[in-house]
């Protein structure tokens, strides 16, 4: 017998090509973008109104490549601070702006550069693989960067005789260790939003959608990853959902992901992965960006990402290594 749900899961119907016309603010953004010779890069977790005016919407890996290749004068990064910082590290001469400077990341916060420096000093010879969700200071102390889209490939490239310290996400690190069979020390950080998804809530949801496959982000805890039919980065979710024959799919990651899935895969129904207390799972940092703030930052070219040149130069090498290794 089906269990009663104690919440209403979010189900977004297909748009079937019926997109609303752009608003006056969105039109203004497109005009300012031209005037400034700017490119707008947006993460998959951004609100739909931002995704619709972006030149490129993607995961952290795709965005890193786009940032590295950008030939505009201004890069507007609609994502969180570490993403905009990464764009600045690979584009020191360009103006990189972020709609809200307070758009941080709990994972990044869980690994302050001073703590990592102290750990490395006490444990020399570690090979540091850093998930891109970290500050420029942490990147500068790392040997190579990875994203959820290339983490396995990157770890497989690390010389076999080196002991790996994986920072800052213990969940992604644990998943990569399991997939690759490579033992690693794991920094005890996590994404506050992804760890809220639970197997208990997923089991309840499955009673309502028994045939819907579950696709989850590797930042989820191990029990949720084990429950899922597929674990992958946000970009790979697009391919998984396109290719899967099911009309209904449960997507266990931040809800902004559903915007892109709806737009690019009309005709399917995407169900937001549930937590124990609600059916929503917004990253409060990703959702700090609004169309108004995007318009204002393009108009004022502020807030702008700046950083110490020594840190930028040191952080560049592990990012470059990642871009080379994951091609
Ligand atoms: P992706 O690399 O899959 O885009 O994920 C980034 C992120 O912040 C997940 O929480
Ligand atoms: Fe950071 Fe989690 Fe938000 Fe991604 S979803 S930006 S990992 S806090």
Image (cartoon, rainbow, N blue to C red):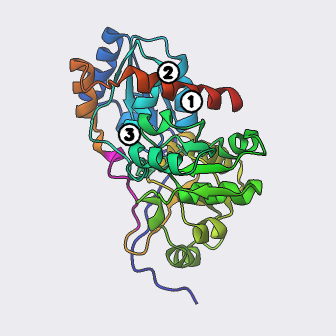
Residue drawn at (55%, 17%), measured in percent from left and top?
Answer: 69
- Secondary structure at badge 3 equals loop
- Secondary structure at badge 2 equals helix
User: Front-most of 160 and 69?
Assistant: 160
Q: Residue 71 appears at what percent x and percent y?
A: 49, 11
> Mark on residue 114?
none
The residue where tag 2 is placed is: 90
Residue range highlighted in magenta:
279-287
Mark 2 vs mark 3: give the one in front: 2
User: Viewed as shown, does residue 127 lie left or right of 105?
Assistant: right
* Residue 21 occupies quadrant: top left
> Mark on residue 80?
3
Bin the neighbour count of mark 3 within 10 Å (Cα to Cα): few under 14, some 14-19, many 20 and up: many
Position of 198 relative to 108 (above/below): below
Asked if the residues shown at circle 2 and circle 1 are in contact, with their CB atoms under 8 angstroms apart, the answer is yes
The residue where tag 1 is placed is: 319
Q: Residue 86 appears at what percent x and percent y?
A: 46, 30
Sequence-earlier tag: 3 or 1: 3
Quadrant location, the N terminus:
bottom right
Mark 3, ligand 2, within 8 Å: the answer is yes
Q: Residue 318 appears at what percent x and percent y?
A: 58, 31
Position of 74 relative to 112 (above/below): above
């Amino acid at each position: 017998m089906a269990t009663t749900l104690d919440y209403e899961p979010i189900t977004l119907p297909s748009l079937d090509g019926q997109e609303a016309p752009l608003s006056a603010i969105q039109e203004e953004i497109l005009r300012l973008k031209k005037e400034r010779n700017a490119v707008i890069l947006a993460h998959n977790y951004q609100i739909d109104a931002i995704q619709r005016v972006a030149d490129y919407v993607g995961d952290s890996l795709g965005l890193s490549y786009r940032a590295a290749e950008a030939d505009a004068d201004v890069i507007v990064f609609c994502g969180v601070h570490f993403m905009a910082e990464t764009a600045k590290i690979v584009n020191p001469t360009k103006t990189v702006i972020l709609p809200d400077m307070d758009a941080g990341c709990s994972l990044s916060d869980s690994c302050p550069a001073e703590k990592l420096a102290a750990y490395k000093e006490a444990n020399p010879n570690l090979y540091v693989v850093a998930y891109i969700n970290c500050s420029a200071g942490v990147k500068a102390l790392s040997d190579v960067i990875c994203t959820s889209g290339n983490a396995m490939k990157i770890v497989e490239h690390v010389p076999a005789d080196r002991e790996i310290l994986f920072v800052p996400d213990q969940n992604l690190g644990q998943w990569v260790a399991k997939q690759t069979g490579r033992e690693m020390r794991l920094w005890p950080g996590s994404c506050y939003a992804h760890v809220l998804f639970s197997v208990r809530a997923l089991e309840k949801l499955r009673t309502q959608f028994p045939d819907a496959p579950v696709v989850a982000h590797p930042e989820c805890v191990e029990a949720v990853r084990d429950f899922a039919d597929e674990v992958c980065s946000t970009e790979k979710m697009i391919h998984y959902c396109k290719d899967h024959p099911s009309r209904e799919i449960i997507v266990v990651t931040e809800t902004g992901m559903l915007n892109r899935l709806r737009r690019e895969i009309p005709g399917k129904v995407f169900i937001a992965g549930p937590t124990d207390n609600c059916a929503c799972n917004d990253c409060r940092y990703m959702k700090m960006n609004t169309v108004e703030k995007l318009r204002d930052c393009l108009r004022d070219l502020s807030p702008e990402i700046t950083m110490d040149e020594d840190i930028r130069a040191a952080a560049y090498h592990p990012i470059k290594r990642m871009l080379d290794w994951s091609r």
